[in-house]
Amino acid sequence: MASPEELRTIRKQKLQTLNDLGINAYPSRSASEITLKEVSESFDDIFDASRKIIVAGRIMSLRGQGAILFVDLFDGTGRFQVVIKKDVEIMYSEEVADENVEDAFELFKETVDIGDFIECAGPLFMTQREVPSMELQSWRMLTKALMPIPSEHFGIKDDDARYRKRYLDILLNPELREIFEKKARFWNVARSFFIENNFTEVETPTIELTTGGAEANPFKTHHKDFDLNVYLRISVGELWQKRLMAGGFPRTFEIGRVYRNEGSSPEHAQEFTNLEFYMAYTDYLEGMDFIEELYRKIAQEVFGKLEFTTRGHTFNLGERWEKIDYCDRVKEMTGIDVMTATEDEMKAKLDELKVKYDGENRERLIDTLWKYCRKSIAGPAFLINHPKIVSPLSKSLDSDPEKTERFQPILAGSELGNGFSELNDPQEQRRRFEEQQEMINRGDDEAMMPEWEFVEMLEYGIPPTFGFGFGERLFAFLVDKPIREIQLFPLMKPREEEI
Protein backbone atom coordinates (compact mmCIF):
# COMPACT_ATOMS: atom_id res chain seq x y z
CA MET A 1 0.00 0.00 0.00
CA ALA A 2 1.42 3.38 -1.01
CA SER A 3 2.34 5.87 1.71
CA PRO A 4 0.75 9.34 1.87
CA GLU A 5 3.93 10.86 0.47
CA GLU A 6 3.97 8.40 -2.43
CA LEU A 7 0.32 9.16 -3.21
CA ARG A 8 1.04 12.89 -3.10
CA THR A 9 3.94 12.42 -5.50
CA ILE A 10 1.76 10.53 -7.99
CA ARG A 11 -0.88 13.25 -7.90
CA LYS A 12 1.72 15.96 -8.33
CA GLN A 13 2.85 14.18 -11.47
CA LYS A 14 -0.72 14.26 -12.78
CA LEU A 15 -0.87 17.94 -11.96
CA GLN A 16 2.31 18.47 -13.94
CA THR A 17 0.75 16.70 -16.92
CA LEU A 18 -2.09 19.22 -16.84
CA ASN A 19 0.32 22.12 -16.46
CA ASP A 20 2.38 20.92 -19.44
CA LEU A 21 -0.76 21.10 -21.57
CA GLY A 22 -1.36 24.70 -20.53
CA ILE A 23 -4.27 23.70 -18.27
CA ASN A 24 -4.86 25.72 -15.11
CA ALA A 25 -5.82 23.10 -12.51
CA TYR A 26 -7.03 25.78 -10.08
CA PRO A 27 -9.23 28.23 -12.06
CA SER A 28 -11.06 31.01 -10.21
CA ARG A 29 -14.56 30.35 -11.53
CA SER A 30 -16.83 27.63 -12.71
CA ALA A 31 -19.45 27.92 -15.42
CA SER A 32 -21.80 25.67 -13.42
CA GLU A 33 -25.38 26.89 -13.83
CA ILE A 34 -27.38 24.56 -11.57
CA THR A 35 -26.78 22.69 -8.31
CA LEU A 36 -26.74 18.90 -8.21
CA LYS A 37 -29.71 18.91 -5.87
CA GLU A 38 -31.68 20.97 -8.39
CA VAL A 39 -30.68 18.58 -11.19
CA SER A 40 -31.88 15.57 -9.18
CA GLU A 41 -35.13 17.14 -8.00
CA SER A 42 -36.10 18.61 -11.39
CA PHE A 43 -34.66 15.85 -13.59
CA ASP A 44 -37.99 14.98 -15.21
CA ASP A 45 -38.75 18.64 -15.93
CA ILE A 46 -35.39 19.57 -17.47
CA PHE A 47 -34.71 16.23 -19.19
CA ASP A 48 -33.98 16.99 -22.83
CA ALA A 49 -31.52 14.89 -24.81
CA SER A 50 -30.69 17.89 -26.97
CA ARG A 51 -30.01 20.29 -24.11
CA LYS A 52 -26.57 20.56 -22.54
CA ILE A 53 -26.24 21.66 -18.92
CA ILE A 54 -23.15 22.44 -16.85
CA VAL A 55 -22.59 21.14 -13.32
CA ALA A 56 -19.63 21.00 -10.93
CA GLY A 57 -18.60 19.14 -7.79
CA ARG A 58 -16.11 16.92 -6.02
CA ILE A 59 -15.58 13.36 -7.28
CA MET A 60 -16.69 11.03 -4.48
CA SER A 61 -16.39 7.80 -6.43
CA LEU A 62 -14.93 6.79 -9.78
CA ARG A 63 -15.90 3.40 -11.22
CA GLY A 64 -15.34 1.51 -14.40
CA GLN A 65 -12.43 1.18 -16.76
CA GLY A 66 -11.79 0.80 -20.45
CA ALA A 67 -14.47 2.41 -22.58
CA ILE A 68 -16.86 3.73 -19.89
CA LEU A 69 -16.47 5.49 -16.52
CA PHE A 70 -19.04 6.35 -13.86
CA VAL A 71 -18.39 9.42 -11.71
CA ASP A 72 -20.36 10.43 -8.62
CA LEU A 73 -20.19 14.19 -8.07
CA PHE A 74 -21.03 15.98 -4.81
CA ASP A 75 -21.35 19.77 -4.58
CA GLY A 76 -22.58 20.20 -1.01
CA THR A 77 -26.25 20.24 -2.05
CA GLY A 78 -26.53 16.74 -3.47
CA ARG A 79 -24.99 14.02 -5.61
CA PHE A 80 -25.36 13.16 -9.26
CA GLN A 81 -23.89 10.62 -11.64
CA VAL A 82 -21.85 11.54 -14.72
CA VAL A 83 -21.18 8.85 -17.35
CA ILE A 84 -18.08 9.17 -19.51
CA LYS A 85 -17.99 7.10 -22.72
CA LYS A 86 -15.00 6.66 -24.98
CA ASP A 87 -17.16 6.45 -28.09
CA VAL A 88 -18.67 9.89 -27.39
CA GLU A 89 -16.66 12.85 -28.62
CA ILE A 90 -15.37 14.59 -25.52
CA MET A 91 -13.68 17.98 -25.33
CA TYR A 92 -11.70 19.50 -22.53
CA SER A 93 -12.33 23.24 -22.37
CA GLU A 94 -12.46 26.05 -24.84
CA GLU A 95 -9.74 27.73 -22.80
CA VAL A 96 -7.20 25.14 -24.00
CA ALA A 97 -6.16 25.00 -27.66
CA ASP A 98 -7.59 21.94 -29.38
CA GLU A 99 -4.17 20.75 -30.48
CA ASN A 100 -2.96 20.57 -26.84
CA VAL A 101 -5.48 17.89 -25.82
CA GLU A 102 -5.61 15.11 -28.36
CA ASP A 103 -7.95 12.85 -26.35
CA ALA A 104 -9.97 14.36 -23.52
CA PHE A 105 -11.23 10.91 -22.50
CA GLU A 106 -7.72 9.56 -22.02
CA LEU A 107 -6.65 12.77 -20.31
CA PHE A 108 -9.45 12.28 -17.81
CA LYS A 109 -8.33 8.72 -17.10
CA GLU A 110 -4.70 9.78 -16.72
CA THR A 111 -5.10 12.86 -14.53
CA VAL A 112 -8.37 12.72 -12.58
CA ASP A 113 -8.73 11.13 -9.11
CA ILE A 114 -11.31 10.74 -6.40
CA GLY A 115 -11.35 13.99 -4.43
CA ASP A 116 -10.78 16.27 -7.42
CA PHE A 117 -13.26 19.02 -8.22
CA ILE A 118 -14.37 19.06 -11.86
CA GLU A 119 -16.83 20.82 -14.12
CA CYS A 120 -18.93 18.68 -16.46
CA ALA A 121 -21.14 19.58 -19.42
CA GLY A 122 -23.52 17.41 -21.38
CA PRO A 123 -27.15 16.29 -21.81
CA LEU A 124 -29.13 14.36 -19.23
CA PHE A 125 -30.22 10.78 -19.82
CA MET A 126 -31.51 7.73 -17.97
CA THR A 127 -29.24 4.67 -17.76
CA GLN A 128 -30.45 1.13 -18.44
CA ARG A 129 -30.72 0.72 -14.67
CA GLU A 130 -32.87 3.87 -14.55
CA VAL A 131 -30.29 6.02 -12.81
CA PRO A 132 -30.62 9.74 -13.70
CA SER A 133 -27.28 10.72 -15.23
CA MET A 134 -25.36 13.12 -17.43
CA GLU A 135 -23.56 11.99 -20.59
CA LEU A 136 -20.27 13.87 -20.53
CA GLN A 137 -19.41 15.97 -23.60
CA SER A 138 -16.80 18.24 -22.06
CA TRP A 139 -15.01 18.57 -18.73
CA ARG A 140 -12.61 20.88 -16.91
CA MET A 141 -10.45 20.55 -13.81
CA LEU A 142 -11.47 22.98 -11.07
CA THR A 143 -9.22 21.76 -8.24
CA LYS A 144 -6.62 19.02 -8.40
CA ALA A 145 -6.49 17.35 -4.98
CA LEU A 146 -2.98 16.30 -3.98
CA MET A 147 -4.11 13.93 -1.24
CA PRO A 148 -6.76 11.19 -1.53
CA ILE A 149 -9.86 11.39 0.65
CA PRO A 150 -10.61 8.31 2.78
CA SER A 151 -13.11 5.76 1.58
CA GLU A 152 -16.71 6.78 2.18
CA HIS A 153 -17.47 3.27 3.35
CA PHE A 154 -14.85 3.22 6.09
CA GLY A 155 -14.57 6.95 6.83
CA ILE A 156 -12.26 8.08 9.65
CA LYS A 157 -12.63 5.85 12.69
CA ASP A 158 -10.13 7.44 15.08
CA ASP A 159 -11.72 10.29 17.08
CA ASP A 160 -8.50 12.27 17.30
CA ALA A 161 -8.09 12.15 13.51
CA ARG A 162 -11.76 12.98 12.97
CA TYR A 163 -11.54 16.16 15.03
CA ARG A 164 -8.21 17.25 13.51
CA LYS A 165 -9.47 16.64 9.96
CA ARG A 166 -13.02 17.72 10.60
CA TYR A 167 -13.42 18.80 6.97
CA LEU A 168 -13.00 15.17 5.88
CA ASP A 169 -15.21 13.89 8.68
CA ILE A 170 -18.01 16.21 7.54
CA LEU A 171 -17.45 15.36 3.88
CA LEU A 172 -17.66 11.62 4.47
CA ASN A 173 -20.40 11.56 7.10
CA PRO A 174 -23.83 12.75 5.88
CA GLU A 175 -25.27 12.28 9.39
CA LEU A 176 -22.71 14.71 10.79
CA ARG A 177 -23.45 17.27 8.08
CA GLU A 178 -27.12 16.97 8.92
CA ILE A 179 -26.36 17.64 12.60
CA PHE A 180 -24.65 20.91 11.75
CA GLU A 181 -27.46 21.90 9.41
CA LYS A 182 -29.89 21.25 12.29
CA LYS A 183 -27.68 23.23 14.64
CA ALA A 184 -27.88 26.22 12.29
CA ARG A 185 -31.68 25.86 12.25
CA PHE A 186 -31.64 25.57 16.06
CA TRP A 187 -30.18 29.05 16.42
CA ASN A 188 -32.24 30.48 13.56
CA VAL A 189 -35.46 29.25 15.14
CA ALA A 190 -34.42 30.71 18.49
CA ARG A 191 -33.50 34.04 16.90
CA SER A 192 -36.81 34.20 15.03
CA PHE A 193 -38.73 33.41 18.22
CA PHE A 194 -37.23 36.37 20.04
CA ILE A 195 -37.65 38.75 17.13
CA GLU A 196 -41.31 37.69 16.82
CA ASN A 197 -41.68 38.46 20.55
CA ASN A 198 -40.37 42.02 20.13
CA PHE A 199 -36.84 41.50 21.46
CA THR A 200 -33.92 43.61 20.23
CA GLU A 201 -30.80 41.66 19.29
CA VAL A 202 -27.70 43.25 20.83
CA GLU A 203 -23.93 42.77 20.94
CA THR A 204 -22.05 43.18 24.21
CA PRO A 205 -18.31 43.02 25.02
CA THR A 206 -16.49 39.71 24.94
CA ILE A 207 -13.42 41.21 26.68
CA GLU A 208 -14.19 42.32 30.23
CA LEU A 209 -12.45 43.76 33.25
CA THR A 210 -14.44 41.41 35.49
CA THR A 211 -16.25 38.25 34.43
CA GLY A 212 -19.76 38.90 35.67
CA GLY A 213 -22.88 36.86 35.18
CA ALA A 214 -21.75 33.35 36.09
CA GLU A 215 -19.44 31.34 38.29
CA ALA A 216 -16.58 29.90 36.27
CA ASN A 217 -12.81 30.08 35.87
CA PRO A 218 -12.06 32.61 33.09
CA PHE A 219 -9.40 32.89 30.42
CA LYS A 220 -7.09 35.79 31.24
CA THR A 221 -5.10 37.95 28.84
CA HIS A 222 -3.49 41.40 28.73
CA HIS A 223 -4.62 44.55 26.98
CA LYS A 224 -1.39 46.22 25.79
CA ASP A 225 -2.78 49.66 24.98
CA PHE A 226 -4.52 50.10 28.35
CA ASP A 227 -1.91 47.99 30.21
CA LEU A 228 -4.71 46.04 31.87
CA ASN A 229 -5.36 42.41 32.66
CA VAL A 230 -8.67 41.46 31.06
CA TYR A 231 -10.82 38.35 30.73
CA LEU A 232 -12.80 36.60 28.04
CA ARG A 233 -16.44 36.63 29.05
CA ILE A 234 -18.06 33.64 30.75
CA SER A 235 -21.65 34.74 30.07
CA VAL A 236 -23.36 36.40 27.11
CA GLY A 237 -23.32 39.91 28.48
CA GLU A 238 -25.53 39.36 31.51
CA LEU A 239 -24.41 42.45 33.40
CA TRP A 240 -24.30 44.46 30.17
CA GLN A 241 -27.81 43.50 29.11
CA LYS A 242 -29.08 44.50 32.55
CA ARG A 243 -27.53 47.91 31.94
CA LEU A 244 -29.67 48.06 28.81
CA MET A 245 -32.73 47.52 31.02
CA ALA A 246 -31.65 50.67 32.88
CA GLY A 247 -31.21 52.40 29.52
CA GLY A 248 -34.81 51.79 28.53
CA PHE A 249 -34.63 48.67 26.37
CA PRO A 250 -37.54 46.48 27.53
CA ARG A 251 -36.43 43.24 25.83
CA THR A 252 -32.97 42.25 24.62
CA PHE A 253 -31.20 39.07 23.56
CA GLU A 254 -27.75 38.05 22.37
CA ILE A 255 -26.36 34.90 20.77
CA GLY A 256 -22.61 34.66 21.17
CA ARG A 257 -19.51 32.77 22.23
CA VAL A 258 -18.46 32.36 25.85
CA TYR A 259 -15.22 31.02 27.29
CA ARG A 260 -14.59 29.02 30.47
CA ASN A 261 -11.15 27.77 31.44
CA GLU A 262 -12.42 24.52 32.92
CA GLY A 263 -12.27 20.79 32.35
CA SER A 264 -13.74 18.99 29.37
CA SER A 265 -16.51 16.42 29.52
CA PRO A 266 -19.31 15.14 27.27
CA GLU A 267 -21.32 18.13 28.53
CA HIS A 268 -18.65 20.81 28.87
CA ALA A 269 -16.27 22.63 26.54
CA GLN A 270 -14.05 25.66 27.05
CA GLU A 271 -15.63 27.63 24.18
CA PHE A 272 -19.27 27.42 23.17
CA THR A 273 -22.31 29.39 22.02
CA ASN A 274 -24.95 30.64 24.42
CA LEU A 275 -28.08 32.76 24.18
CA GLU A 276 -29.14 35.13 26.97
CA PHE A 277 -32.20 37.34 27.07
CA TYR A 278 -33.82 39.81 29.44
CA MET A 279 -37.47 40.85 29.75
CA ALA A 280 -38.48 43.92 31.75
CA TYR A 281 -41.64 43.89 33.88
CA THR A 282 -41.64 40.06 34.02
CA ASP A 283 -40.72 37.56 36.74
CA TYR A 284 -39.49 33.97 36.81
CA LEU A 285 -43.01 32.50 37.00
CA GLU A 286 -43.98 34.07 33.67
CA GLY A 287 -40.50 33.11 32.45
CA MET A 288 -41.22 29.40 32.93
CA ASP A 289 -44.20 29.56 30.58
CA PHE A 290 -42.09 31.47 28.05
CA ILE A 291 -39.30 28.85 28.16
CA GLU A 292 -41.74 25.95 27.76
CA GLU A 293 -43.03 27.61 24.60
CA LEU A 294 -39.50 28.31 23.32
CA TYR A 295 -38.16 24.78 23.90
CA ARG A 296 -41.21 23.21 22.29
CA LYS A 297 -40.93 25.50 19.26
CA ILE A 298 -37.24 24.62 18.81
CA ALA A 299 -37.94 20.90 19.14
CA GLN A 300 -40.86 20.91 16.72
CA GLU A 301 -39.35 23.14 14.05
CA VAL A 302 -35.81 21.71 14.12
CA PHE A 303 -36.50 18.04 14.86
CA GLY A 304 -40.17 17.62 14.00
CA LYS A 305 -40.94 15.97 17.34
CA LEU A 306 -41.34 16.62 21.07
CA GLU A 307 -40.21 13.26 22.48
CA PHE A 308 -36.50 12.52 22.81
CA THR A 309 -34.31 9.74 24.18
CA THR A 310 -30.90 10.88 25.33
CA ARG A 311 -28.32 9.99 27.99
CA GLY A 312 -30.43 6.98 28.96
CA HIS A 313 -33.56 9.08 29.63
CA THR A 314 -36.74 9.62 27.63
CA PHE A 315 -38.68 12.88 27.96
CA ASN A 316 -41.52 14.59 26.12
CA LEU A 317 -41.50 18.37 25.97
CA GLY A 318 -45.21 18.36 25.25
CA GLU A 319 -46.05 16.87 28.64
CA ARG A 320 -46.57 18.76 31.91
CA TRP A 321 -43.30 20.14 33.28
CA GLU A 322 -42.87 19.05 36.89
CA LYS A 323 -41.64 21.62 39.44
CA ILE A 324 -38.91 20.22 41.70
CA ASP A 325 -37.92 21.96 44.92
CA TYR A 326 -34.12 22.14 45.19
CA CYS A 327 -33.80 21.58 48.93
CA ASP A 328 -36.63 19.05 49.18
CA ARG A 329 -35.16 16.85 46.43
CA VAL A 330 -31.67 16.87 47.95
CA LYS A 331 -33.08 16.00 51.38
CA GLU A 332 -35.28 13.27 49.90
CA MET A 333 -32.34 11.60 48.14
CA THR A 334 -29.51 12.20 50.62
CA GLY A 335 -31.10 13.00 53.96
CA ILE A 336 -29.24 16.32 54.04
CA ASP A 337 -31.03 19.63 54.61
CA VAL A 338 -28.70 21.98 52.78
CA MET A 339 -30.20 25.01 54.53
CA THR A 340 -29.16 23.84 57.99
CA ALA A 341 -26.46 21.15 57.56
CA THR A 342 -22.88 21.98 58.45
CA GLU A 343 -20.04 21.75 55.95
CA ASP A 344 -18.70 18.70 57.79
CA GLU A 345 -22.08 16.95 57.54
CA MET A 346 -22.25 17.62 53.81
CA LYS A 347 -18.67 16.41 53.25
CA ALA A 348 -19.38 13.26 55.23
CA LYS A 349 -22.45 12.53 53.11
CA LEU A 350 -20.54 13.11 49.86
CA ASP A 351 -17.79 10.79 51.06
CA GLU A 352 -20.43 8.19 51.92
CA LEU A 353 -21.93 8.53 48.45
CA LYS A 354 -18.42 8.29 46.93
CA VAL A 355 -18.93 11.64 45.18
CA LYS A 356 -15.84 13.72 44.47
CA TYR A 357 -16.06 17.42 45.22
CA ASP A 358 -13.87 20.42 44.45
CA GLY A 359 -13.63 23.05 47.13
CA GLU A 360 -14.92 22.81 50.66
CA ASN A 361 -16.95 26.00 50.99
CA ARG A 362 -20.65 25.78 51.62
CA GLU A 363 -21.74 26.86 48.15
CA ARG A 364 -19.65 24.20 46.37
CA LEU A 365 -20.79 21.44 48.73
CA ILE A 366 -24.47 22.30 48.27
CA ASP A 367 -24.06 22.41 44.48
CA THR A 368 -22.27 19.03 44.46
CA LEU A 369 -25.03 17.38 46.47
CA TRP A 370 -27.61 18.67 44.00
CA LYS A 371 -25.61 17.46 41.01
CA TYR A 372 -25.61 13.98 42.52
CA CYS A 373 -29.42 14.10 42.79
CA ARG A 374 -30.20 15.49 39.34
CA LYS A 375 -28.90 12.44 37.45
CA SER A 376 -32.11 10.49 38.09
CA ILE A 377 -34.49 13.17 36.74
CA ALA A 378 -35.64 12.55 33.15
CA GLY A 379 -37.76 15.69 32.91
CA PRO A 380 -39.12 17.83 31.56
CA ALA A 381 -38.98 19.65 34.87
CA PHE A 382 -38.16 23.00 36.41
CA LEU A 383 -35.82 23.09 39.39
CA ILE A 384 -37.00 25.89 41.71
CA ASN A 385 -36.33 27.49 45.09
CA HIS A 386 -32.53 27.49 44.89
CA PRO A 387 -30.70 28.56 48.06
CA LYS A 388 -29.54 32.17 47.91
CA ILE A 389 -25.93 31.12 48.43
CA VAL A 390 -25.84 29.42 45.01
CA SER A 391 -27.75 32.25 43.27
CA PRO A 392 -25.83 35.54 43.77
CA LEU A 393 -27.73 37.47 41.08
CA SER A 394 -31.33 36.36 41.64
CA LYS A 395 -34.07 37.95 43.71
CA SER A 396 -35.01 36.34 47.04
CA LEU A 397 -38.41 34.75 47.61
CA ASP A 398 -40.73 36.94 49.67
CA SER A 399 -41.87 33.85 51.56
CA ASP A 400 -38.31 32.64 52.31
CA PRO A 401 -35.51 35.21 51.85
CA GLU A 402 -32.81 32.51 52.01
CA LYS A 403 -34.17 31.02 48.77
CA THR A 404 -34.52 32.64 45.36
CA GLU A 405 -36.87 33.23 42.44
CA ARG A 406 -34.83 31.06 40.11
CA PHE A 407 -35.48 28.04 37.90
CA GLN A 408 -33.51 25.68 35.69
CA PRO A 409 -35.03 23.37 33.05
CA ILE A 410 -34.04 19.75 33.79
CA LEU A 411 -33.81 17.31 30.87
CA ALA A 412 -32.12 13.91 30.90
CA GLY A 413 -30.50 14.44 34.30
CA SER A 414 -28.94 17.82 33.56
CA GLU A 415 -29.69 21.54 33.82
CA LEU A 416 -30.24 22.93 30.33
CA GLY A 417 -30.77 26.59 31.00
CA ASN A 418 -30.86 29.04 33.88
CA GLY A 419 -33.28 31.86 34.63
CA PHE A 420 -34.41 34.05 37.50
CA SER A 421 -36.09 37.21 38.62
CA GLU A 422 -33.14 39.56 38.49
CA LEU A 423 -31.91 41.08 41.73
CA ASN A 424 -32.41 44.83 41.36
CA ASP A 425 -31.87 45.93 44.97
CA PRO A 426 -28.43 47.62 44.88
CA GLN A 427 -27.75 47.22 48.59
CA GLU A 428 -28.54 43.51 48.53
CA GLN A 429 -26.45 43.08 45.39
CA ARG A 430 -23.51 44.78 47.12
CA ARG A 431 -23.81 42.41 50.09
CA ARG A 432 -23.85 39.38 47.81
CA PHE A 433 -20.85 40.60 45.83
CA GLU A 434 -18.99 41.08 49.10
CA GLU A 435 -19.73 37.44 49.96
CA GLN A 436 -18.39 36.37 46.55
CA GLN A 437 -15.25 38.45 47.15
CA GLU A 438 -14.68 36.66 50.45
CA MET A 439 -14.92 33.32 48.61
CA ILE A 440 -12.32 34.54 46.10
CA ASN A 441 -10.07 35.62 48.95
CA ARG A 442 -10.35 32.10 50.38
CA GLY A 443 -9.13 30.64 47.08
CA ASP A 444 -12.37 29.83 45.18
CA ASP A 445 -11.40 30.26 41.50
CA GLU A 446 -15.01 29.93 40.31
CA ALA A 447 -16.63 32.49 42.60
CA MET A 448 -18.23 35.42 40.79
CA MET A 449 -16.05 38.52 40.45
CA PRO A 450 -17.73 41.58 42.01
CA GLU A 451 -18.60 44.34 39.55
CA TRP A 452 -18.98 47.54 41.55
CA GLU A 453 -19.92 49.70 38.56
CA PHE A 454 -22.83 47.31 38.06
CA VAL A 455 -23.94 48.05 41.62
CA GLU A 456 -23.72 51.76 40.83
CA MET A 457 -25.96 51.18 37.81
CA LEU A 458 -28.50 49.45 40.03
CA GLU A 459 -28.58 52.53 42.24
CA TYR A 460 -30.00 54.42 39.26
CA GLY A 461 -32.65 51.68 39.01
CA ILE A 462 -33.79 48.95 36.64
CA PRO A 463 -37.35 47.64 36.31
CA PRO A 464 -38.42 44.21 37.56
CA THR A 465 -36.71 41.92 35.06
CA PHE A 466 -36.56 38.23 34.15
CA GLY A 467 -33.38 36.89 32.59
CA PHE A 468 -32.53 33.51 31.12
CA GLY A 469 -29.70 31.79 29.31
CA PHE A 470 -29.18 28.50 27.48
CA GLY A 471 -26.56 27.17 25.12
CA GLU A 472 -25.53 24.64 22.56
CA ARG A 473 -25.51 21.99 25.30
CA LEU A 474 -29.30 21.91 24.86
CA PHE A 475 -28.79 21.07 21.20
CA ALA A 476 -26.23 18.38 22.14
CA PHE A 477 -28.82 16.74 24.38
CA LEU A 478 -31.56 16.87 21.76
CA VAL A 479 -29.33 15.07 19.23
CA ASP A 480 -27.85 12.84 21.99
CA LYS A 481 -24.24 13.66 21.18
CA PRO A 482 -21.27 14.81 23.31
CA ILE A 483 -20.75 18.54 23.03
CA ARG A 484 -17.45 18.17 21.15
CA GLU A 485 -19.29 16.18 18.49
CA ILE A 486 -21.64 19.07 17.76
CA GLN A 487 -18.85 21.64 17.49
CA LEU A 488 -17.42 22.16 14.03
CA PHE A 489 -13.81 22.53 15.16
CA PRO A 490 -13.28 21.57 18.81
CA LEU A 491 -9.99 22.67 20.38
CA MET A 492 -7.25 20.05 20.03
CA LYS A 493 -3.82 19.77 21.59
CA PRO A 494 -1.03 20.00 19.01
CA ARG A 495 0.58 16.72 18.04
CA GLU A 496 4.02 16.20 19.57
CA GLU A 497 5.70 16.73 16.20
CA GLU A 498 3.96 20.12 15.90
CA ILE A 499 5.22 21.41 19.26
Image: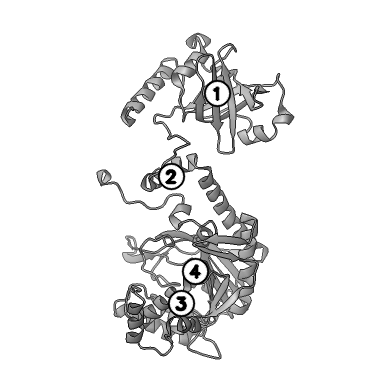
The amino acid type, in three-letter code, at marker 3 is Phe
Secondary structure state at the residue bearing disc 1: strand
Compare marks 3 and 2 and give the one earlier in the sequence.
2
Q: Nearer the viewer, mark 3 or mark 4?
A: 4
Q: Is residue 42 above or below residue 439?
A: above
Q: Looking at the picture, does residue 234 appear above or below residue 16?
A: below
Tag 1 and tag 2, C-beta contact below 8 Å:
no
Residue that label 3 marks: 454
Q: Nearer the viewer, mark 2 or mark 4?
A: 4
The reply to whether discs 1 and 4 touch (Cβ–Cβ < 8 Å) is no
User: Which residue is label 1 attached to?
Assistant: 70
Tell me the amino acid under the disc marked 2: Arg
Select label 3 or label 2 by which is in front. Answer: 2
Give the x, y percent position of residue 209: 38, 69
Locate residue 370 relative to residue 355 in the image: left or right.
Answer: right
Q: At label 4, which amino acid type do we have?
A: Gly
Q: Secondary structure at mark 3?
A: helix
Using the image as rendered, state which of residue 278 and residue 401 is in the foreground. Answer: 401
Element type at mark 2: helix
Which of label 1 and label 2 is nearer to you? 1
